Amino acid sequence: MLEAIGLTKNYGEVRALRSLDLQVKSGEIYCLLGANGAGKTTTLNIFLGFVQATTGIARIDNIDVSHDPIATRKRIAYIPETVTLYGALSGLENLDYFSKLSGIKHSAESLHGFLEQSGLAVEAHRRPLQGYSKGMRQKVGIAIAIARDAKVLLLDEPTSGLDPKASNEFSQLILAMAERGSAILMATHDLFRARETGSRIGIMRDGSLCKEFAAGEIGHRDLELEYLKTMQEG
Ligand code: ATP
């Protein structure tokens, strides 16, 4: 569903990505770990069509992002560290607005249903977003992804700053999205969350994918040791 083949990105002298190969299938959650500047956001930005690769191919649903970024963008829901929504509008209104932007008009009943699936308390549906916590905003982001029936979910440090309960709830939501068949690529610094949620975990350093682990193949402690070892090898 999501594939990078020999992706390279240079920003002038800076080599942000060096021949990155990556695959995420439907139903998989791929967690991308790596120090600041390893190239995680650049990878996501290439899939989003925000940044053009210097060389290599990024494909979503077998469509080359550089050939048809509009078609690939339609298949993606993107949740950054802080979901950007309209503070004066309620969760329900934001969901309605962003669904319509994607060309989908849902009934009020369906919109409430998506917010409920995302775990947002019913009492909050009609409250202005400016009173929401970060975790509640992330839930609206997930509701938008559900409403758009996104085949691909790109997440950039989505649990950063969430308390452990909110972070756990977020993990349950993306696990449910994966069960529905979405392919999920999540950049994160949270080793614990990656180990708990990921079907596969990749460790990046200096624009390359250095190590990959399947879920269940590695324990929390060993993942931390492997991560630290990879950073020291640089
Ligand atoms: P973080 O964990 O801090 O978000 P990251 O793994 O997401 O880091 P990137 O943001 O992809 O890393 O950055 C990879 C490299 O590319 C870094 O050296 C960064 O300084 C550089 N870089 C990223 N964007 C640009 C840009 N627009 N112009 C120049 N250099 C950039």
Image (cartoon, rainbow, N blue to C red):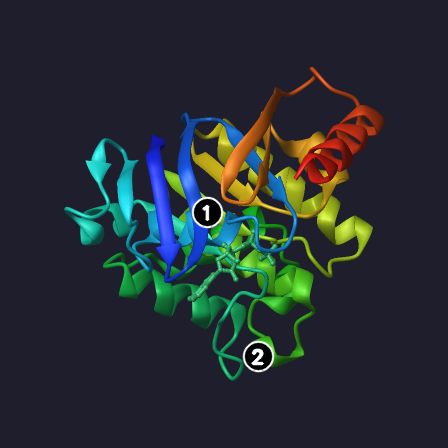
Q: Is residue 20 visible?
A: yes
Q: Is residue 182 above or below residue 155?
A: above
Which residue corresponds to the image point at 59% horizontal and 59% vertical from the top-left? 138
User: Mark 2 — residue?
Assistant: 128
Q: Please, what secondary structure does the residue beneath circle 2 have?
A: loop
Which label was assigned to residue 12?
none
Residue 194 rendering spot, x and y as whole percentages = 67, 36
Q: Residues within 10 Å of mark 1 (few under 14, many from 20)?
A: many
Q: Quadrant of the N terminus?
A: top left
Which-is-in-front pick, marks 1 and 2?
1
Residue 196 rendering spot, x and y as whole percentages = 72, 31
Q: Please, what secondary structure does the residue beneath circle 1 have?
A: strand
Question: Relative to the observer, which residue lies in front, 167 or 124?
Answer: 167
Residue type at numbered disc 2: Pro
Question: Relative to the observer, which residue lies in front, 117 or 161?
Answer: 161
Q: Is residue 127 above or below residue 40?
A: below
Residues at marks 1 and 2, CA–CA distance in whole angstroms: 26 Å
Relative horizontal placement of residue 107, taking residue 128 as reference (left or right):
left
> Is the CB atom of the residue marked by disc 2 within 8 angstroms of ligand 1's nearest atom?
no
Residue 80 rendering spot, x and y as whole percentages = 52, 59
Which residue corresponds to the image point at 39% horizontal and 40% vertical from the top-left? 152
User: Mark 1 — residue?
Assistant: 154
Residue type at numbered disc 1: Leu
Residue 197 rendering spot, x and y as whole percentages = 65, 33
Q: Is residue 191 above or below residue 145?
A: above
Which residue corresponds to the image point at 62% horizontal and 21% vertical from the top-left? 213
**Res 206 quadrant in image:** top right
Q: Quadrant of the C terminus?
A: top right
Residue furthest top as drawn: 217
Q: Is residue 149 visible?
A: no
Relative horizontal placement of residue 49, taking residue 82 as reference (left or right):
left
Mark 1–mark 2 CB contact (< 8 Å): no
